[in-house]
Amino acid sequence: MTDLSQQKCEACRADAPKVSDDELKELMGQIPDWTPMARDGVMQLEREFKFKNFKQAMAFSNKVGELAEAEFHHPSILLEWGKVTVTWWTHAINGLHKNDFICAAKTDALLSD
Ligand SMILES: C[C@H](O)[C@H](O)[C@H]1CNC2=NC(N)=NC(=O)C2=N1
């Protein structure tokens, strides 16, 4: 499988398929630091990123925001002192689409920028 972080998101459509349980298992292998979880019945991918201070956390948050705009696929970003919690899911289908895994992998890649 092509590296998720090298792939591009497709346009979010209301009739797009959610990932299957088998696809979820396979895709999670490429983003092992993320946690799939259900919130109010909506499957999401979440990861906490730790930083030395608020300034570094804010800089990372901004990079995630740029990534979201570049892919036109947007996460929840919780910015706290020394920590950023990023949560990806697809609003249009109230669940997980391959786009979310691509963006999670691209989020991880920001750490080595
Ligand atoms: C109108 C709608 O919000 C847009 O088409 C895009 C913007 N960014 C998005 N981001 C996410 N995570 N899910 C979406 O369904 C989505 N839709």
Image (spheres, helix red, strand yellow):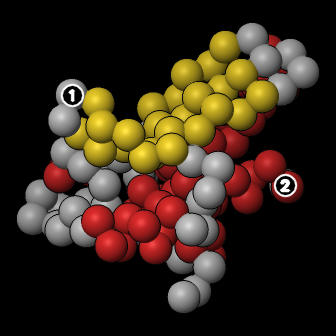
Q: What SS does tag 2 mark? A: loop
Between residues 10 and 70, which one lies in front from this camera angle? 10
Q: Which mark sits nearer the N-terminus, 1 or 2?
A: 1
Instruction: Check the image and report above or below for 104 versus 8.
Output: above
Q: In the drawing, what numbered circle is on residue 40? A: 1
- Residue located 30% across and 37% down the image: 38
**Which quadrant of the view contains residue 100?**
bottom left
Between residues 2 and 69, which one lies in front from this camera angle? 2
Within 10 Å of disc 2 (Cα), the crowding (few <14, some 14-19, many 20+) is: few
Q: Amino acid at mark 1?
A: Asp
Between residues 76 and 23, which one lies in front from this camera angle? 23
- Tell which tag, 1 or 2, sits nearer the viewer: 1
Q: Can see residue 70?
A: no
**Which quadrant of the view contains residue 45?**
top left
Instruction: Check the image and report above or below for 75 versus 33.
Output: above
Q: Amino acid at mark 2?
A: Asp
Image quadrant holding the C terminus, namely bottom right
Please give the residue where the numbered disc 2 appears in the rendered image: 113
Residue 33 lies, in percent from the top left, at: 64, 49
Count the numbered circles shown: 2
